[in-house]
Amino acid sequence: MAELVPFAVPTGSDKTLLVWELSSGPTAEALQHSLFTVFSQFGLLYSVRVFPNAAVAGPGFYAVIKFYSARDAHRAQKACNQKQLFQKSPVKIRLGTQHKAVQHNALALNSSRCQELANYYFGFNGWSKRIIKLQDLSDPEEETENEDMVAPLQRQSLKFFCALEVVLPSYECRSPGVGMAEEPLDNLEEESGKIAVAYRSCEEVTDARTEEELQDLIQVSCFSRKPCGQGEEECLSDFSFEEQEFTVPELD
């Protein structure tokens, strides 16, 4: 059976492994490296986190490992449970458990994570992306009207809309996506004093969408945009997609 892998931060308990009875000899950093080396052989990892045992459990460490694929996590658990791996004593590994009433909202991956996931499953040359439209949505008139109500350095911001397309040549598949980014002008001025946005097309757009279609995308993006309150690792950055899914074929 095929598995759907979303471009989202993995939250399911079937994608999470709990590893305990790790030796107290190595440091947490050394254990993290060893665990990553072993478990990355079964599939792409989202994170490997190592923690010291509670005082009542005695010296040692335990780890929480997150896969993007539930199938990869299951294979890793079966292959590595009660094995010595990289230490003299065997480790214990279980799939995560989660109460049915507990539900987590899916958080979109940031741009670098999306590219890492696409490169892993499609290959470095198995996909590409191109910008269809980049538009400045900043409203200077609105800023002028509010200039007496807000401090000068806080009354301006830059807002850009971007429509792009991901292409999978081998599957003859295309997936459009839209995003919008906004940044206070004072934060940008503190960095360099000059602001410039440049877009250089890597190919000639031969099937660009009509202006009407792009305007519809802009309106949808404006109405659906929500403020970001997540951490850096889980935040949708730049112009990455809303949650998307792709199918991982079952291995023979």
Image (cartoon, helix red, strand yellow):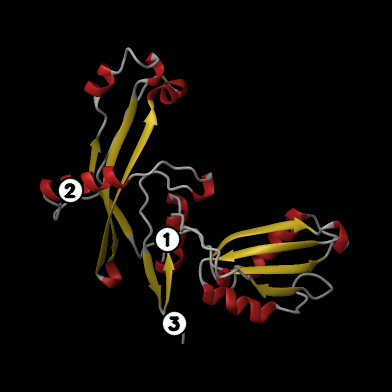
The first of marks 2 and 3 along the sequence is 2
Q: CA distance from mark 2 to mark 1?
A: 24 Å
Q: Is residue 57 in view from this perspective?
A: yes
Q: x, y percentage for residue 26?
A: 82, 58
Q: Does residue 209 appear to the left or right of 59 in the view shown?
A: left
Which residue: 42% across, 25% down?
A: 188
Q: Amino acid at mark 2?
A: Asp
In this orientation, which residue lies closer to the viewer: 158 or 191?
158
| Between 215 and 149, the one nearer to me in the picture | 149
Dot 1 falls on a residue whose secondary structure is: loop
Residue at 30% of width from left, 18% of height from top?
Answer: 146
Spot occupied by residue 221 in the image (x, y as percentages of width and height): 27, 46
Residue lying at the far bottom of the rendered structure: 252
Above or below — where is 90 with respect to 194? below
Q: Position of residue 241 (x, y in %)?
A: 35, 53
Indicate the quadrant where residue 161 lies. Answer: top left
Pointer 2 residue: 216
Residue 137 image position (x, y, % from top left):
25, 34
Disc 1 target residue: 7
Name which residue lies at 80% across and 55% down: 27
Residue at mark 3: 250
Q: Nearer the viewer, mark 3 or mark 1?
A: 1
The three-letter amino acid code for the residue at tag 1 is Phe
Type of residue at label 3? Answer: Glu
Label 2: element kind: helix
Report, in whole angstroms, how far the alpha carbon at label 3 lies from the one at label 1: 19 Å
